[in-house]
Amino acid sequence: MNPPSLPPWLQRQLKELRQQRGHALLLAGPSGLGQYDLALALARSWLCEAPTEQGACGHCGSCHAVAVHTHPDLCMLMPETLSLALGWPLDEASQKKIDDKDRKPSKLIRVEATRQAVTFTQFTRSRGDTKVVLVYPAERMNMESANTLLKTLEEPVGSVRFVLATEAAHQLLPTVRSRCLTHQLQWPSETEALPWLMAQGAQPMNAEQARAVWRAAGGRPDDALRWAAMGLSAQTWSQLPQALAHGQAQAMAEWEPALQLDVMQKVCHDAMAVASGAEPRFFEVAHLPPKAHLFRLQRWSQELMHAARSVEHPVNAGLRWEAWVSQAQQALSPRR
């Protein structure tokens, strides 16, 4: 069973990271750059019985065990919600409590799971020469979880290696960061990313759609794949700023509130950039409403940041959406 192929920019970084000799690596960077994929590929290569320059061989028993999420020398330290979403098994006690509805899956890395990871490092290896603990997203460790891991992270017992991956390195304890070799994830170029994007999925995209989802994602590959999976077309994306300016953004009315808010923030960002004489990032200049007033855009930006704090709260979605569209229309109207 071959491991999933990495994009070329992640493959280059994997090759670099395999040359590192430190026992703890921290993969850091903004969201959407492939932290999880790179961390898992690195862990798989460390555990592989016949690794190559490109990483894991994909054929040995160890590679198969990682692929089916049963490798005894790999500990995945993640929030329970993410473990369940990605198919990584929980310990029996936690799974039973969740199944019995005694509690909900945790969105944080629980201290109990961290203690189990520390215990895992103390056991004898089952297959090869290495045991691996993968922590993702590392910023989901609370103070107690992080402190539980510190001593083992600094002085692991035997041949144990750690790979921590984060989308918010500034939220990690300085003592955690200081015990790791930090690798900043690289942003792929549009020239390299577009051919890769066009080859993804059951129905490959044309160049126009690939460029649209790439701009919608702000150059973040993981986000671009999610936009592509939604079937976002170049026409829909290009029309959104003008639609918001006219209070007619029905194309995004059924999207999740967090996604609606994300799009509005991108429109606001680009409109402010153009009003200030800078280049937009997410849309073409021609697709943005002309002559928007910078003061109103700044006020809209503040309103959007305020809305982001409560976007997950249960409210009347229809009324909230109408309020957001009204704010957008006022902010994007031509200055008088």
Image: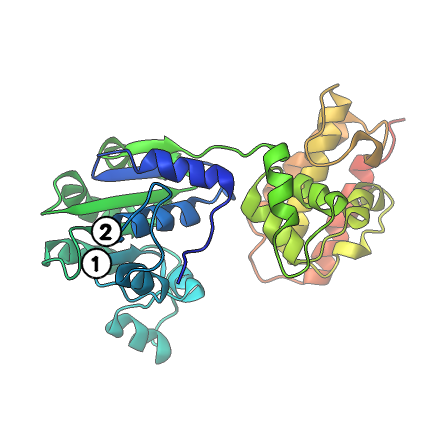
Q: Which mark is residue 47?
A: none
Image spot of residue 166 (x, y percent): 39, 42
47 over 276 or under it: above or below? below
Left or right placement of residue 82 versus residue 89 in this view: right
The residue carrying mark 1 is 73
Q: Look at label 2 and name its amino acid.
A: Val
Q: Look at label 1 and name its amino acid.
A: Asp
- Residue drawn at point x = 18 percent, y = 56 percent: 115
Res. 304 visible in picture:
no
- Looking at the image, the residue that sits furthest to the top is 277
Pointer 2 with pointer 1, Cβ within 8 A = yes
Q: Earlier in the sequence, mark 2 or mark 1?
A: 1
Left or right placement of residue 234 versus residue 304 in this view: right
- Residue drawn at point x = 28 percent, y = 34 percent: 19
Quadrant containing the C terminus is top right
The residue carrying mark 2 is 132
Image spot of residue 333 (x, y percent): 85, 35
